[in-house]
Amino acid sequence: MTPMRLTGLSAFPITPADAGGRVDGPALRRLVARSCKAGVDSIGLLGSTGSYPYLTREERRRALDATLDEAGGRVPVMVGIGALRTDEAVRLAQDARAAGAAVGLLAAVSYTPLTDEEVYEHVAAVARHSDLPLCLYDNPTTTHFRFGPELIGRLSRLPGIVAVKSPGQEPQAVAGHLATLRATVPPGFSLGYSGDWTTTEALIAGADAWYSVVAGLFPQVAVEIVRAVQRGEVAEARRLDGRLGLLWALFRHYSSLRVIYACADLLDLCHAAPPRPILPLGEEARGRIAEVIRGLDLR
Amino acid sequence: MTPMRLTGLSAFPITPADAGGRVDGPALRRLVARSCKAGVDSIGLLGSTGSYPYLTREERRRALDATLDEAGGRVPVMVGIGALRTDEAVRLAQDARAAGAAVGLLAAVSYTPLTDEEVYEHVAAVARHSDLPLCLYDNPTTTHFRFGPELIGRLSRLPGIVAVKSPGQEPQAVAGHLATLRATVPPGFSLGYSGDWTTTEALIAGADAWYSVVAGLFPQVAVEIVRAVQRGEVAEARRLDGRLGLLWALFRHYSSLRVIYACADLLDLCHAAPPRPILPLGEEARGRIAEVIRGLDLR
């Protein structure tokens, strides 16, 4: 596979699995096929929404193999390779490289709080020992480590570090955030964002990529937004995004992961529950979600 | 082993291991033997200082077996059984019960941020399926979940939940914190604290237990403080604690885990490094630490 430039829309599916953490390959393939068919630019397998830290190395490899097979080389696959230990992250990156993933998504998973120097050495070791292009995964809500611009700048100069996935920014802050990062990274380094309810403004401000939870289940609406921005139709992109306001409100209230599991179940796409201790949402929440996806005609 | 009441001093050793995460049994036994010989009331194996989340189930069992053998039934052993997945925490609790641990120390390890209900169900499942007495481990700095008094109160009414290990409180706040918890838990439920630089005041205020990093390497000074409080010699306890001020400053600045690894190395007790990505402290920090332990005559 030719080196991938992370641009446009990356779809982050859940990873359907049973209560023991065994991945449901056919269900995962159904989700990946939906996103590919809708025309996403890449699959972001085993992101936080894909509950990567809850799955064993073996199950992560099974999920990757199924996804690569389903994507068929037409849609590049980025895969989460984060782990608490450096040696484990190296092994996961080597697995991903051997399987044929285009990029590894590397979060600074922590228990003992980490210093910048520790994360620098962690990322450098994974890059050095895997030869897999890497996207830095800045997700302070889950990892409790924040990649500052100075660290991103240093890491962006290492061979193989090609992108950063930043957390969602407030609309009035995203242009400044992008400018700060652009000033620290080499030309061609991809700057992308997650936090679906913030990403339309990020794309309009010039972000390279949207790392999208909604595109892992309802890819069509996300593709339409991204293509509108790419055509320069800013008002249309904002209209499409605004239409999803009730869904974004659910994402913010319950977390996008919990909402998307409920959506997949309600639509009969798969009936997996998130890994325990994360609980499926209760009946009241499911009722509200059902109403919103019906009202928005999401399917 | 008869049911253990968590009181007095619990010593939390590091878990010496090689770069691949294989536990060094003889080195661990040396640390455990020091603490037992000094007269600690229990061993707190595989706490955060014991880097439990970085070790496999097999290595955690090896560490526990070595410690139980070294403690020889004379000093009860509490062992960390925390894990990201509920089923894994259940298996670790079952292992601990089968091996002969007195209590399991259960943290709310998280990646996806957890709700109170999720943590309640997680703890209840571990208690139900293991029949191991449990100490709740409230460590927001590492797990990013905070056990509030209401949740502690609910959990303390479940069979087998016997104690809580709370994070260190400011001196002026600890009496209030203790009173709030006392009002929510049944009589006999043990309330203890970590954060070595805060625990003398917690004991003076009436806490049942000190979960101590320093006692995992330098048990003598910690035993003296606890016994002084138990004899009602508050001024003496404060004097002994005050004498350790320079050590507490290092703990706060570099983290107690990093400092204790350096101390163990400097004293030739063991030459393990913390699990990567955590880095050993550099030469400057080691120099400061060497000076402090020499000045305090710690050995």
Image: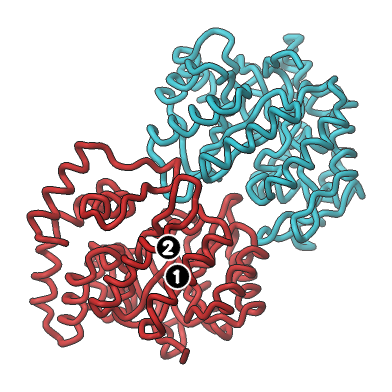
Chain colours: A red, B cyan
| Drawn side of residue B56 relative to residue B191, left or right | right
Q: Dot 1: within a 10 Å radius of its alpha carbon, few (fewer than 14), some, or many (20 or more) residues? A: some
Give how far across and how far down residue A86 sits, in percent. 65, 64
Q: Dot 2: within a 10 Å radius of its alpha carbon, few (fewer than 14), some, or many (20 or more) residues? A: some
The chain ID associated with circle 2 is A
Residue at 43% over, 31% down? B121
Give, as a three-letter code, the residue at label 1. Ala
The chain ID associated with circle 1 is A
Residue linked to disc 1: A66
| Drawn side of residue A295 relative to residue A161, left or right | left
Whether label 1 touches label 2, CB < 8 Å = yes
Q: Which of B52 and B148 is in front in this view?
A: B52
| Drawn side of residue B125 relative to residue A212, left or right | right
Q: Is A201 rendered above or below residue B160?
A: below
Q: How many labels does the image show?
A: 2
Give how far across and how far down residue B38 sits, in percent. 88, 26
Q: Residue A25 carries which label?
A: 2
CA distance for labels 1 and 2: 6 Å
The answer, for residue A177, to whether it is visible in the render is no
Q: Which of B77 and B298 is in front in this view?
A: B77
Give, as a three-letter code, the residue at label 2. Gly
Residue at 77% over, 22% down? B76
- Quarter the N terminus of chain B occupies: top right
